[in-house]
Image: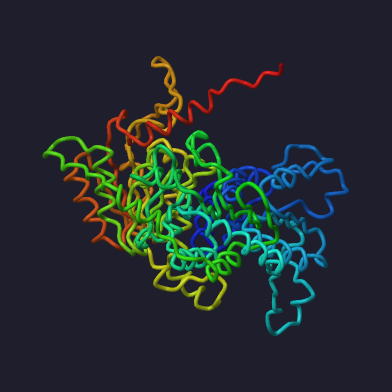
Amino acid sequence: MIWCCNELNAGYAADGFARKQGVGCCISTFCVGGFSLLNAIGGAYAEDLPVICISGGPNSNDYAANHVLHHTTGDASDYGQQLRCFKEVTCHQVVIQHIEEAHRQVDHAISAALIHCKPVYIQVCCNIVGITHPSFANSESTIPFSLHTQHSKALSLEAAVRASVKVLHEAHKVVLLVGSRIRPPSVRAAVLTFAEKSEYAVAQMADAKGMFPETYSRFIGTYRGAVSWPAVAEIVESADLVLSVGCVWNDYSTVGYSLLLKPERMLTVADGQVTICAGATFGCIGPADFLSALAMAVTPNNSCWTAYTRMFVPQSTAATLPEGVPLTSLVMAKTVEAYLDSNTALISEVGDSWFNTQKMRLPLGCEYELQMRYGSIGWSVGCTMGYALACGPMCRVASAALPGTVGITQTEAAKRVLTLVGDGSFQMTAQEVSTMLRYSLTPIIILVNNGGYTIEVEIHDGPPHNNYNVVKNWDYTALIKAMYNQGDQGGKLWTADAGTEAGFRAALAKARELSDHLCFIVVTLNRNDCSKELLEWGSRVAAANRRSPLLRH
């Protein structure tokens, strides 16, 4: 049981925990806590994360008593406002008012979260909480729980594979493109097996980074239209057929809807169905089942990989800065990339951190997380705490005790979290660093201080006399030190400020040595210094936002 500073951060932490361990849980009080939690659960819903959200509720007798309750909006006849809100961001909701129904309701909610990879909502009347369900009153052992699993329909699967093999074999240039919905371990394993059997070149969407090994022999990089890795857009967009698995298309992932992909040249695997070249669609098919079956029938084709090797020119690395010259965004990213290893989990906050981390090549075993679809500023601080907890000794013991439930080995779990977060984002959720110290967590938090919301500047900036993208500059190191009381029980803290390349490199080296400390490093950059990818992406997203309304004629 982990106590957070507020409900929003608790939701972000459950999000981070679910990313690592496969499921998370957060608890809040009624209305005043639940409404605060709502935004984080909305993010988990958008990102396909099974988070079990538990809320207190009114006394079961109050529903008919016409009482006005504290923490509510004061409408005695309506206690359903919070439930209606959570219906929009969860896949299943239950309100437990009677102990006789509790067992069934809780089982159904947990099942829904695990099957659909979405949050669920459980509201418990406050006078029901302490009552033992009859099933457990005299039971000497836990009652077994059986999770319903979804299966592919055999005839539909067979037909989809047959039709897919036909178009794949007719195409000369085929590329495999993976998206964020390959997150389930079974799907990721099936994708890798299929890639090895087919020999297709493999590209990833930006929000799928970390889900496919970047050390794979035919991995070409991240596809993101005009801001793709070198030569990747050219290979993907010129392919005769793109096999798209688990991709989600929105204005951010498509760079303002500017991708040049054509549906009639795509074989799409998503949402439990397979669609062939914008035509025939086969339903009731799980992606892991489909890829496993397709791998047995596909003919190897490495033409796109061969074309990629002919045109690929490696990017030059940023030159070392002279002594005393202020640190730049490009050099900061290069320094962080050099730090990464198989024992690292990299978490990227919304903003230019996206673009700085997206172009890093992850070593084998290095994990990566971002929240691109929902993009809630401040998410990374709570997520860092949840992810670090999921990597800790307590969770490794739990994993060992429950074989097959999370699919994470002790070696995979033991990662040190490194987080890149901007100053504007950090100001949203900074207080949760105190919780990390309370529970002796040891992440490395790199705070990029450039005086504002840089990503917002590149989409739409405010006027010079009233610039709403500028934030008040805090003494961030002093703030974090104020959260740390050496006399209290809890973790250790080390802080540093770095404004030059040499200073930042030394700070990261020291942080590596202090593996039992929470390390907080403030990096100072010029406000107008950002990645070239953000400049391009921001202008295209801004153009999409400015599209004129469609007029009726």
Quarter where residue 503 is shown: top left
Residue 249 vs residue 339: left or right?
right
Q: Residue furthest bottom?
A: 140
* Residue 494 picture location, percent across and down: 28, 53
Where does the C terminus fall, quadrant-wise? Answer: top right
Q: In percent of the image, x 69 and y 75: which residue is there?
A: 145
Residue nearest the observer in this picture, 486 or 432? 432
Q: Residue furthest right?
A: 64
Residue 4 visible from this viewpoint: no
Q: In percent of the image, x 28 and y 35: which residue is there?
A: 525
Where does the N terminus fall, quadrant-wise? Answer: bottom right
Number of residue marks:
0
Residue nearest the observer in this picture, 435 or 364? 364
* Residue 30 picture location, percent across and down: 69, 48
Q: In percent of the image, x 60 and y 64: which residue is there?
A: 290
Residue nearest the observer in this picture, 377 or 275? 275
* Residue 33 picture location, percent across and down: 63, 46
